[in-house]
Amino acid sequence: MSFKSTVQRRLANRVKDALRDVSLQLALLNHQVGARLKLRDVDFDCLNLLNQHGPLGPGALAKLAGLHPATMTGVLDRLEKAGWATRDRDREDRRAVVVRAAPERGREIFELYAGMNGSMDDICADYTVEQLEIIEEFLRRTAAAGHDSTVKLTD
């Protein structure tokens, strides 16, 4: 990667510093939300993955979370016991298991993020449609880079 100018390099470093700060602040927020819900951090992460990616097999969820399948069994046991997820037989392959987040519990999570969601609405209102499109693309590309880096570390 070659920068076009010193100014661009400095700005890129400021962006990376800001992303580290965002990452830390969101991790702290997620930790507080998880604690309010009486969920371990890893359990809350897996619940978030289920909510984002829909029903998944335990192996696929373990891979997404970067966890060993045996660890995933304990996570799913805790989520199921607390009523956050269910393990059901796959409709197409009755031998396979599919994990689903319990949709009726989503309101509890939504309420805990209401303050942050309101703040994000206020922040986004300050940008034009074109600026929001650029921000969205940047964040998607950043998330993809984070995913790729995670996969490389877990292989």
Image: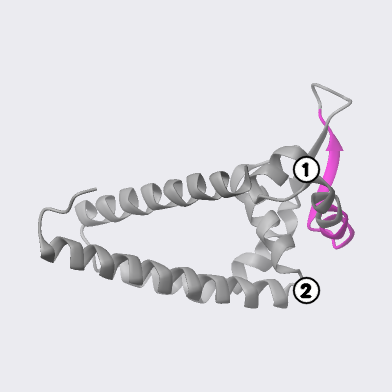
Report if residue 62 lies within the magenta region.
no
The span shown in magenta is 76-90
The answer to whether residue 90 is left or right of residue 121 is right
Q: Which mark is residue 38?
A: 2
Disc 2 marks a residue whose amino acid type is: Lys
Q: Is residue 84 magenta?
A: yes
Which residue appears at 71% of the width and 52% of the height? 103
Q: Residue 8 vs residue 133: left or right? A: left
Kindly state the secondary structure of the residue where label 2 is placed.
loop
Q: Position of residue 102 (x, y in %)?
A: 76, 52
- Secondary element type, mark 1: strand
As displayed, is residue 42 above or below residue 115? above
Q: Nearer the viewer, residue 8 or 134?
A: 8
Q: Badges 1 and 2: C-beta atoms under 8 Å apart? A: no
The x and y percentages for residue 7 are: 12, 66
Q: Is residue 85 left or right of residue 60?
A: right
Residue at 84% across, 48% down: 70
